[in-house]
């Protein structure tokens, strides 16, 4: 990633979001599309720059404001914004415009630039750049009501030659979600969004195969990855000992990286309770 521009690692991703319109008489909607949703880059000479595209796909114009917050992923809570962080990118990040009005069918661009001071230690710095709509609507009684919706692009900027280092620590049964989960640890200095392919076996018998879409895990942290198995209409596997084998896959420096794993799994006798 030797470029001075922000590089999208998930440029195929886009998202559609519907404003929090209240269902009075008629439904007021503001629909936007943001691209990309994930940006990752290695800073060159302390700088990086790029663009987020915001498209109005509705039939009405909308106003939006743009702001940035530090964030992390935690083992249990997943994505979380923070008030402060040692990896906070926001203090080095500039963007414009900070407010914009977008007519129907039009795309506007938010330009980003990060500038690191020479004294900044090596490491990865992160922020989520939110685009939040600022529309108003009138309810059935004639009152003006604010309708807001926001969607964010997560931005990772690396200062120095940094890499993730992933390992699957264990597999366990999540009694609340009633699904199998993997505990994945990243001891490296860079965040990463691996996909997971997995096979559940009991002895020589293959019980199920599946995969997980890209899931973020930040540098020097761990996180549970839900396998989404069993699904809503699938029975819980019978209690006993299983083996979960597979691999993590991600891209790094335009190359495909893999980390195989093989861990034991115990399905408890009460796993099917409540189903």
Image (spheres, grey):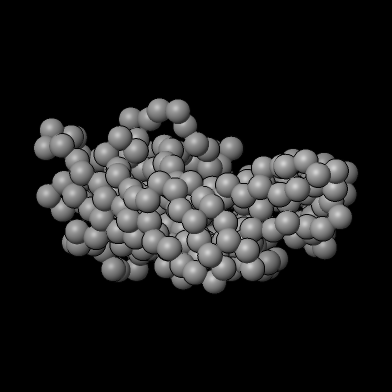
Q: Position of residue 166 (x, y in %)?
A: 39, 50
Q: Residue furthest top?
A: 84
Horizontal side of residue 18 vs 41, given as left or right = right
Q: Position of residue 12 (x, y in %)?
A: 46, 70
Instruction: Name the residue rendered at 13%, 33% in the picture.
Output: 119
Quadrant containing the N terminus in the rendered view:
bottom left
Q: Position of residue 132 (x, y in %)?
A: 54, 48
Horizontal side of residue 114 vs 145, given as left or right = left
**Residue 16, picture quadrant:** bottom right
Q: Nearer the viewer, residue 1 or 270?
A: 1
Count of picture labels? 0
Using the image, determine if residue 30 lies above or below residue 140.
below
Residue 230 visible within the image: no
Q: Residue furthest front?
A: 142
Q: Nearer the viewer, residue 193 or 50?
A: 50
Instruction: Name the residue rendered at 42%, 67% in the picture.
Output: 11
Q: Position of residue 240 (x, y in %)?
A: 73, 50
Residue 136 visible within the image: yes
Instruction: Name the residue rendered at 47%, 61% in the picture.
Output: 54
Horizontal side of residue 214 vs 243, given as left or right = left
Q: Nearer the viewer, residue 189 or 151?
A: 151
Instruction: Name the residue rendered at 32%, 56% in the picture.
Output: 111
Horizontal side of residue 63 vs 25, given as left or right = left
């Amino acid at each position: 990633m030797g470029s001075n521009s922000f590089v999208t690692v998930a440029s195929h991703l886009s998202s559609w979001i519907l404003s929090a319109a209240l269902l009075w008489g008629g439904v007021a909607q503001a629909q936007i599309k943001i691209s990309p949703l994930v940006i990752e880059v290695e800073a060159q000479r302390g700088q990086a720059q790029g663009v987020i595209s915001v498209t109005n796909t509705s039939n009405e114009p909308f106003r939006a404001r743009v702001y940035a917050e530090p964030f992390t992923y935690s083992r249990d809570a997943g994505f979380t914004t923070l008030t402060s962080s040692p990896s906070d990118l926001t203090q080095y990040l500039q963007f414009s415009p900070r407010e914009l009005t977008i007519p129907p069918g039009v795309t506007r661009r938010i330009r980003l630039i990060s500038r690191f001071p020479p004294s900044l230690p090596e490491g990865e710095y992160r922020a989520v750049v939110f685009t939040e709509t600022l529309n108003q609507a009138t309810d059935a009684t004639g009152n003006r009501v604010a309708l807001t919706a926001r969607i964010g692009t997560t931005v990772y900027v690396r200062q120095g030659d940094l890499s993730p280092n992933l390992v699957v620590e264990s597999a366990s049964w999540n009694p609340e979600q009633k699904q199998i989960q993997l505990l994945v640890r990243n001891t490296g200095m860079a965040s990463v969004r691996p996909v997971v392919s997995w096979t559940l076996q009991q002895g020589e018998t293959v019980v199920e195969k599946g995969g997980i879409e890209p899931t973020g895990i930040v540098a020097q942290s761990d996180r549970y990855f839900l396998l989404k198995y069993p699904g809503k209409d699938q029975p819980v596997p019978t209690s006993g000992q299983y083996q979960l084998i597979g691999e993590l896959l991600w891209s790094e420096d335009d190359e495909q990286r893999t980390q195989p794993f093989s861990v034991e799994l115990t399905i408890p006798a009460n796993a099917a309770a409540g189903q």
